[in-house]
Image (cartoon, rainbow, N blue to C red):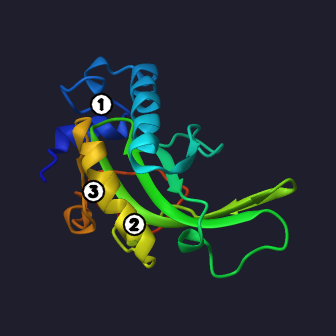
Amino acid sequence: MNISDNEISNLLSQQTISPQYPWATNDSQEVEKFFKFVIPDLERKSHVKSRIEWSHYGSGYASFVDAWFYRESADFATKYQPTHGKSYTGLVALLSRLSPYFVLLEGEKSWSENGGSSYLPQFDAIDAFQTLSVAELAEQVQPILEGHGLIRLSHSMLDKPLNPKFHVPTVLTESIYSF
């Protein structure tokens, strides 16, 4: 994968980089509408439930939709079960709002009537599946997303430092940025 400096500049300006629909519209509502069609299709075909973070984590702009998929079964149960509420490990698909790219990782969520907890997406978690059922789900989900024109990026594809001329504003990391 090669992203040009011009494309990186566009991404950092929150502009899309794809001539493909819906990104070519450069309309965030069209992109969200597309994902709101894709996700239920994925749920039906892979027999999973989901919890989707459509907002921007409440602290600024997120260039992706955080989609978390799980099954209410023992093979998705977390090691430590809460006394109240639910807790599962699941498959995370970070779906780019600005391009047809996505990444997959594993993450845990817990929730009850009093609140909940969740993973925070991290670069080192991309493709690092610790739970067999999550790894198997990733194999089922990838072709469904690709069938909708999305393109999976791997950890190794993204592990190249960005040109230092780019400044990436973020609250998530202090490390060297990569794409």
Residue named by callout 3: 179
Q: Earlier in the sequence, mark 2 or mark 1?
A: 1
Residue named by callout 2: 123
Left or right of 24 on screen, residue 51: right
Left or right of 57 on screen, residue 176: left
Q: Earlier in the sequence, mark 3 or mark 2?
A: 2
**SS class of the residue under badge 2?**
helix
**SS class of the residue under badge 1?**
loop
Above or below 126: residue 5: above
Report the amino acid beneath label 1. Thr
| Mark seen at residue 16 | 1
**Crowding at mark 3 (Cα within 10 Å: few <14, some 14-19, many 20+):** some
Distance from Cα at disc 3 to Cα at disc 2? 10 Å
> Would you identify the image quadrant in which residue 41 lies?
top left
**Crowding at mark 2 (Cα within 10 Å: few <14, some 14-19, many 20+):** some
- Residue at 28 percent across and 67 percent down: it is 155
**Crowding at mark 1 (Cα within 10 Å: few <14, some 14-19, many 20+):** many
Front residue of 65/50: it is 50
- Residue at 30 percent across and 30 percent down: it is 16
Circles 3, 2 touching at the beta carbon (< 8 Å): no
Please provide percent x and percent y for residue 39: 44, 38
- Residue at 13 percent across and 53 percent down: it is 1
Report the amino acid beneath label 2. Phe
